[in-house]
Image (cartoon, rainbow, N blue to C red):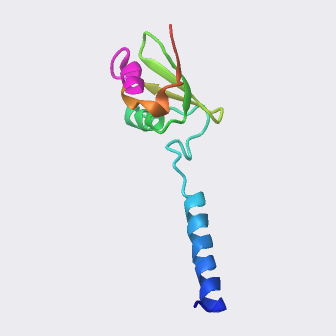
Amino acid sequence: MFSKKSISMLFVLIALALVTVACTSNDAAAGIEDGATVDWETAVEIVNSGEVEMAFQTHSLDVTLMLKDGRRIETVEPGIDDIMDVIDACGSPCQNIAIATE
């Protein structure tokens, strides 16, 4: 049916595919250091990725995102409560984000 060489080659190809998938990062915040300030569009991508554990907004439009990996990321929302709208629109990946306001 199949030779040992064919079966070995199939296992190698499957292993390479699995390694490729495992090494592909879906981290929208990759390379962003703890405490960094990002633009609003980047912050929205991070929220939508499901990486946010908590969001805090101030009346002065400053937003702090606490990520699940412990990093803190800062941004400025265009209008008051825009972060709430982003979280609401995000759906399932954002359903457990804690929200705090001042």
Q: Magenta region: which residues?
A: 77-88
Across and down, in percent, residue 18 comes to 59, 65
Residue at the limit of the structure toward the left, as seen here = 79
Q: Is residue 13 above or below residue 76?
A: below
Across and down, in percent, residue 66 comes to 58, 27
Q: Is residue 3 above or below residue 19?
A: below
Instruction: Tell me the residue at 53%/41% (across/down).
Output: 29
Q: Is residue 42 above or below residue 95?
A: below
Q: Nearer the viewer, residue 24 or 73?
A: 24
Q: Is residue 88 above or below residue 1?
A: above
Residue at the limit of the structure toward the top, as seen here = 102
- Does 7 appear in magenta? no
- Does 79 appear in magenta? yes
Residue at the limit of the structure toward the front, as seen here = 1
Instruction: Tell me the residue at 55%/41% (across/down).
Output: 32
Instruction: Tell me the residue at 62%/84% (across/down).
Output: 7
Instruction: Tell me the residue at 47%/37% (across/down).
Output: 46
Number of numbered discs overlaid on the protein picture: 0
Give the quadrant of residue 59: top left
Across and down, in percent, residue 49 comes to 47, 39
Side (left or right) of 22 relative to 28? right
Side (left or right) of 1 relative to 88? right
